[in-house]
Image: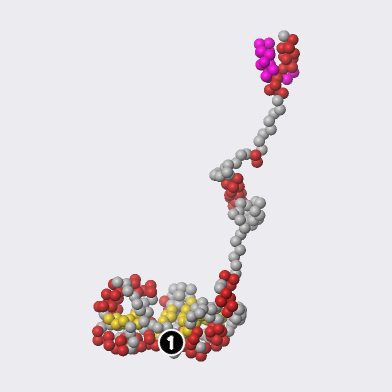
Amino acid sequence: MAKKADLLVEAKALNLEVNDKNTIAQIEAAIAGASAPVAEPVAAAEVKTAKSGKRSEKAIAEAEQKAEKEARKEAGDTTPQSDDVETHVTKGPRPVTRPLIERRGKSYRKVAELVEKDKVYSLADALELATKTNPSKFDASVEVHVKLGVDPRQADQNIRATVSLPNGTGKTIRVAVFAPEADHAGATKSGADIVGDETFLAQLDKEVIDFDVLIATPAYMPRLGKYARLLGPRGLMPNPKSGTVAADVAKATKDAKAGKVEYRVDKQAIVHLSIGKVSFGTKSLAENAKAFFDSLQSQKPSSLKSSYVKSTSISTTQGPGIKVENVIS
């Protein structure tokens, strides 16, 4: 009993609710519980996280970053944030984009060194340089690219015309003629590769296209209407502006074979045209270029108030661009 009395005194000192009815074991347990140290609360940073899912460290960090971003958006804070990897979740270092010239082939980089980047060449010098900057092993085409100040969406500024190049294009043009039987002999004599009427339509029904230019007579044009979706996207639909709708199919065929080509402005207001091959030499290329520029000058819209030509450049098929002085006002 003396032990129980001592335990009761100790329990009362700890303000424990015990009395004589409690057993010695119960009193000892109450005293032990009151004497145990209080566990400290778990810090927020010590919360257990999962390896994946919404409770993973990455998901929690992304959620906090998104909440912070929304808060800045609501507060109207447009201050640029740091890209420090310690405060942002990233997937690795930012990729380094190499300059375009470094992504070119060795042959291209070698010939590109011959072209001064910011220099504007005369037409003669540009053509001579173009023949020296062909990185291809084949006889590449020499192309002229003219940026115009027109709006292609306006009907009177949608430039489209044809030009006969004095020295041809250097390409073998396959000409097809769709005309009455009476015109077949003249077209064949002028060099047409395909001549026909019903037999030609039978080939189109099979979607067989083995020609580069299609010439038709005005009377036969309505019969080509059903093939507009086949020929139109390929630029093969005959058109009076391009000289491919003609009553004299023999003359039209002869012109097409001799180097008569069509050019038109694209959606970016640029005209692209091949004026020959590298093997032509500077003199022949210059003659073809002059014929093209004269034709383009004649197509200047009367309603145009701004400058007609903004920039001109020349290049080979796979070669670097060469800036050229504008020869058209």
Relative placement, left or right, of 207 versus 113 is: left
Q: Look at the image and tell me in which quarter the N terminus lies.
A: top right
Residue 153 at what x, y percent from top left?
A: 44, 73
Residue 144 at what x, y percent from top left?
A: 50, 81
Q: Nearer the viewer, residue 152 or 1?
A: 1
Range of magenta residues: 12-29
Q: Any magenta on residue 168?
A: no
Decide if residue 286 is in sight here: no
Number of marks in the rendered image? 1
Image point (64%, 56%), residue name: 83
Farthest residue, direction front: 137
Relative placement, left or right, of 265 versus 31 is: left
Display coloring:
secondary structure
Decide if residue 267 is in sight here: yes
Q: Nearer the viewer, residue 255 or 221?
A: 255
Residue 39 at what x, y percent from top left?
A: 68, 30
Farthest residue, direction top: 1
Residue 125 at what x, y percent from top left?
A: 57, 86
State the image quarter where residue 47 is shown. Answer: top right
State the image quarter where residue 48 is shown. Answer: top right
Amino acid type at image mark 1: Gly
Q: Mark 1 highlights which residue? A: 168
Q: Any magenta on residue 14?
A: yes
Image point (47%, 79%), residue name: 272
> Dot 1: few (<14), some (14–19), or many (≥20) neighbours within 10 Å?
many
Q: What secondary structure is marked by label 1?
A: loop
Image point (33%, 81%), residue name: 176
Instruction: Note whether 282 is above or below 148 in the view shown.
Output: below
Image point (48%, 82%), residue name: 139
